[in-house]
Image (cartoon, grey):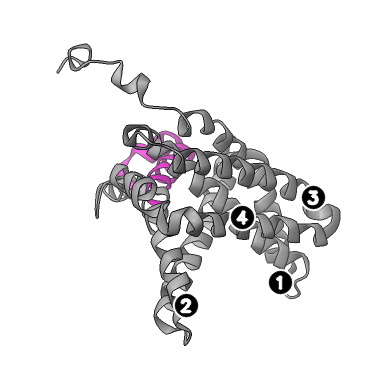
Amino acid sequence: DVRRMLLTMKAYSEAMRGLLYDTARAIDLSHQHPDQSTRRHFDDRASLLTPVVKAWCTDLGVEMASVGIQIHGGMGFVEETGAAQYYRDARIAPIYEGTNGIQGIDLVTRKLPLAGGEVVRSYLDELAGLCAELEAAGTELASVRRGLEQGVDQLRTATEWMLSRTDPNDALAAATPYLRLFGTVSGGCYLARQARAAVDGAGDDAFLAAKVATTRFYVDQLLPQAFGLVPAATADASALFAVTTEMLGV
């Protein structure tokens, strides 16, 4: 179980880092690319990914800090280890700079509709293209390719559902699980890009092998959790509004 927790921390950290780097790249190109239309393309891409970066990464930061405490056992709760301090420090991040619920709302109400939905569709097409590129790695990444193809298909289904909503409450109700789905699938694709490079890479063999192994763990053990989010990410608001304020005791 400790091995699973350590691998979970490693895999999520590298997936988040991939998303962060790609978003930073988009921001750079939105300012520095010599072609105006290309600058606009990457400005839209950065706008799409920014709420996912903020919310998905900070939510996972809290969760991974909690896992760190769990790994330490009872000593993790003791101040001298420092593990509990990491958790307290991480816990504010989902609240800072627009709470993560607001980030989800921004994603589904402002970012998905950019250019009539073509910005997010273009991004999903790129993720699907990455999955296709994994075929060149042969059997070594075959299970990774199959898992990610399923993930991208699920994310596309949820995205089209979001874009088709006429009642804004439906999109708002599903915003948080949708953002989590978006981040989890995207993160897996960034890991797969690293694994694909590692298969053909040369240099530190242990480092390259770790990239492939981490990606396999993510796709086999973490990505499937996102599939369970699809029903919540495509559910209307009726269940939320069936509960009155009196039922909540407020």
Query: Is 57 drawn above or below residue 101 in the view shown?
Result: below
Query: Magenta segment range?
Result: 57-81
In percent of width and height, residue 187 lies at 55, 53
Mark 2: amino acid: Ser
Residue identified by numbered label 1? 204
Magenta-drawn stretch contains 67: yes
- Check disc 1: other Cα within 10 Å, few if <14, some if 14-19, many if 20+: few
The answer to whether the residues at label 2 and label 1 have Cβ atoms under 8 Å apart is: no
Residue 142 is marked as: 3
Of discs 1 and 3, which sits in the foreground?
Answer: 3
Mark 4: amino acid: Cys
Mark 1: amino acid: Asp
Of discs 2 and 1, which sits in the foreground?
Answer: 2
Query: Is 147 drawn above or below residue 141 in the view shown?
Result: above
Image position of 245 (left or right of 30): left
Residue identified by numbered label 4? 189
Residue identified by numbered label 2? 37
Magenta-drawn stretch contains 44: no
In percent of width and height, residue 107 lies at 38, 49
Quarter of the figure with residue 208: bottom right
The answer to whether the residues at label 1 and label 3 have Cβ atoms under 8 Å apart is: no
